[in-house]
């Protein structure tokens, strides 16, 4: 199969050819996945956390908590990450994805101490049409960024002098924001204010950035850029452009999120749902490919260490205690046996 490795785009059509022969150009239909409306996510102004009085700070915290309970998603302004960093990240992200596919996949461009490199694209082993992803990404572990400071380590990331410091700046600021929000949510669960619990278990060793690109998909209307899923982490922070395409489940129905490039999106992951005993919601979401234009986003995933015990202090407990390592292993097993992620329902305690 000729992948046209000198081209920029991944060879989606070549690899997915058998699926498309069945699919044709008919829109992908799923009655359970019909989007009924476009909505704004709850908007939280984080400014009072720094410059507000006690009343304003408490109001801000309540808004964060309520959005995490009711939606599992919200957007924030006055988050403390300078626009210059976000704009520079976007520019460098565009440059990275404009490299030839051959360079991205074979030369491990931006390789940062990962066994298979940092580049991913499409769906590795799809078994049905609904599993196809029309996207490419660079996954950048925070430990990999730290390793780039070590002159003894051959880090391809060093080859781009502009990208390295920009990504490190973004990673530093967004990880602090994630920890701040996680601590506020943890405090609401009954832990003492200023508790170091979250900071003790959520370390750079397992947290990472993911730069995403969703190319235009003009032929196959309705195809997902990223398949429906819940995040397996503690907390995710997303910076996206103005294109749109992010959809999530609210009250049992799919809604489309109205894009706002002036905000950051925050969503709860599976492990925080387990940690909170179901108080906070990890919500199913996806990205639908655009017919005409590409979509860009950058996500930060706050993870606990692989062996940290995730167990709620609330009684009665809904979930068995688990670790990130156990959870990822179960997801891998379920993917092999069922074709997809089963998730937290595997860890429900029977009454």
Image (cartoon, grey):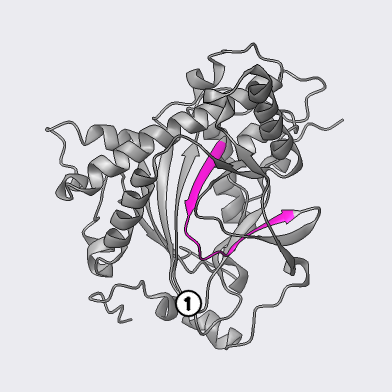
Is 212 rendered above or below residue 236? below
Percent x, y of residue 281 = 71, 40
- Magenta stretch, main secondary structure class: strand
> Which corner quadrant of the image does residue 144 belong to?
top left
The residue wearing badge 1 is 16
- Residue shown at the point (78%, 72%) measured from the top left: 31
> Which residue of the protein is positioned furthest toward the right in this rendering?
351
Residue ID at (32%, 37%): 169
Q: Residue 326 versus residue 91: which sits nearer the camera?
A: 91
Observer-nearest of 347 and 218: 218
Is 206 rendered above or below residue 314? below
Q: Residue at x 37, y 32 (%)?
A: 172
Residue 193 visible, this orientation: yes
> x, y (%) of residue 171?
37, 37
Between residues 71 and 15, which one lies in front from this camera angle?
Answer: 71
- Residue 119 picture location, percent across and down: 34, 56
Whether residue 241 is in magenta: the answer is yes
Q: Is residue 123 above or below residue 323?
A: below
Q: Is residue 183 left or right of residue 94?
A: right
Image: magenta residue range: 235-249
Counting every numbered tag in the picture gives 1
Q: Residue at x 87, y 30 (%)?
A: 351
């Amino acid at each position: 199969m000729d992948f046209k490795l000198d081209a920029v785009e991944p060879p989606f059509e070549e690899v997915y050819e058998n699926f498309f022969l069945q699919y044709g150009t008919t829109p992908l239909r799923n009655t359970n996945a019909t989007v009924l409306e476009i909505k704004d996510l709850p908007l939280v102004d984080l400014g009072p956390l720094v410059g507000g009085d006690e009343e304003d700070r408490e109001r801000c915290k309540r808004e964060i908590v309520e959005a995490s309970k009711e939606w599992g998603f919200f957007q924030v302004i006055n988050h403390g990450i300078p626009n210059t960093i976000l704009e520079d990240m976007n520019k460098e992200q565009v440059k990275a994805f404009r490299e030839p596919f051959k360079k991205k996949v074979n030369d491990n461009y931006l390789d940062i101490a990962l066994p298979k490199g940092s580049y991913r694209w499409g769906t590795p082993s799809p078994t049905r049409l609904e599993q196809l992803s029309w996207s490419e990404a660079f996954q950048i572990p925070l430990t990999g960024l730290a390793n780039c400071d070590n002159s003894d380590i051959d880090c391809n990331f060093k080859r781009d002098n502009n990208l390295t410091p920009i990504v490190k700046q973004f990673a530093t600021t967004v990880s602090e924001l994630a920890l701040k929000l996680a601590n506020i949510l943890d405090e609401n669960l009954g832990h003492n204010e200023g508790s170091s619990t979250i900071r003790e278990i959520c370390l750079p060793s397992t947290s990472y950035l993911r730069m995403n690109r969703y190319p235009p998909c003009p032929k196959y209307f309705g195809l997902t850029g990223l398949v429906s899923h819940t995040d397996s982490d503690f907390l995710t922070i997303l910076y996206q452009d103005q294109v749109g395409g992010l959809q999530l489940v609210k009250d049992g129905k799919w809604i489309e999120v109205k894009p706002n490039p002036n905000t950051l999106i925050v969503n709860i992951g599976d492990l925080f749902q387990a940690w909170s005993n179901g108080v906070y919601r990890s919500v199913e979401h996806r990205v639908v490919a655009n017919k005409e234009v590409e979509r860009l986003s950058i996500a930060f995933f706050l993870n606990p260490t692989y062996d940290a015990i995730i167990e709620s202090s609330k009684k009665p407990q809904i979930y068995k205690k688990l670790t990130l390592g156990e959870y990822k292993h179960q997801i891998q097993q379920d993917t092999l046996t069922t074709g997809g992620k089963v998730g937290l329902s595997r860890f429900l305690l029977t009454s």
